[in-house]
Image: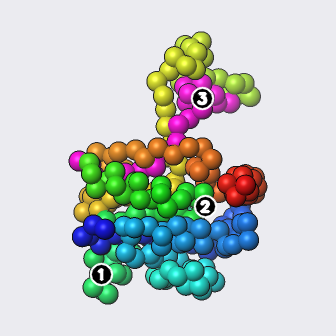
Amino acid sequence: MVDQKILALIPARGGSKRIPEKNIKVLSGKPLISYSIITAKKSKYIDKVIVSTDNEEIADISREFGSKVIIRPKELAKDETPTIEAVFHAIDSLKKENYDPNIIVLLQPTSPLRNTKDIDNAIEIYLNNNCESVVSVCELKHTPYWSLKIDGGYLKPLFGEKYLKVRNQDFEKAYLPNGAIFVSEPKYIFKYRSFYCKYTIPYMMPFERSIDIDNEFDFMLAEFFMRKTVQ
């Protein structure tokens, strides 16, 4: 164990347009949010797990799985509200309870396949390197330079036609934030108003643990990989 207060913060608002009550929808027998709580509580570094929510049902289920809860105001749980505002609210709320974490690990509840080893590995990278944050990513299968747009009903290259003539393997590798793990300190989070800082180190995760549930297909995909993991 390290001699630091390390908080796992799970932001889970009640509103969800694509999947109603997404954060408590049952996935492989348990509410979606429970996976993030369970994996965080098993961490050898995290000393406190908090769910930030505006929804009483999410709050009750979170408590059932052993998380403490911070109720945030409705104005911080709108579709357009940046997640970082929930982080600021949680930090301020915890200060009133005399808990001032040294490190914050943000865990989105929509990443149920992220495991405890991923969390601990990301924290260790943060602790053992000269950086301001660690963000989990996965490698893109195809280069973003092949992206297209629709202009006047026709497909056009988003970055220029010259890139369409280059083989995928000839491009530099590209990575996508998977939304699973963000690690930083409050001073950097307030400085940049983000977990993306000047000195951010990636934590690499494979595709099968990088699923970020946004729609029903993602739910089915997560169920599939969970069954494969059990087998």
Q: Which residue is mark 2?
A: 112
Residue extent of the magenta highlight: 130-150
Position of 188 relative to 148 (above/below): below
Report helix, strand or loop for mark 3: loop
Q: Position of residue 127 (x, y in %)?
A: 28, 56
Number of marks in the rendered image = 3
Q: Is 64 displayed left or right of 87 in the figure?
A: right
Tell me the CA gap for discs 1 and 3: 44 Å
Q: Amino acid at mark 3?
A: His
Report helix, strand or loop for mark 2: loop
Q: Residue at x 61, y 54 (%)?
A: 212
Are the residues flagged by discs 2 and 1 in contact, CB closer than 8 Å? no
Are the residues flagged by discs 1 and 3 in contact, CB closer than 8 Å? no
Which quarter shows the C terminus? bottom right
Tell me which colouring the rendered structure shows.
Answer: rainbow
Q: Which residue is mark 1?
A: 99
Q: Position of residue 60 (x, y in %)?
A: 60, 86
Mark 2, Cα crowd under 10 Å, few <14 / some 14-19 / many 20+, is many
Q: Amino acid at mark 1?
A: Tyr
Q: Which residue is mark 3?
A: 142
Q: Is 127 displayed left or right of 164 in the figure?
A: left
Q: Is residue 172 visible?
A: yes
Q: Residue at x 34, y 55 (%)?
A: 124
Q: Is 60 displayed left or right of 217 in the figure?
A: left
The earlier-in-sequence mark between 2 and 1 is 1
Position of 163 relative to 64 (above/below): above
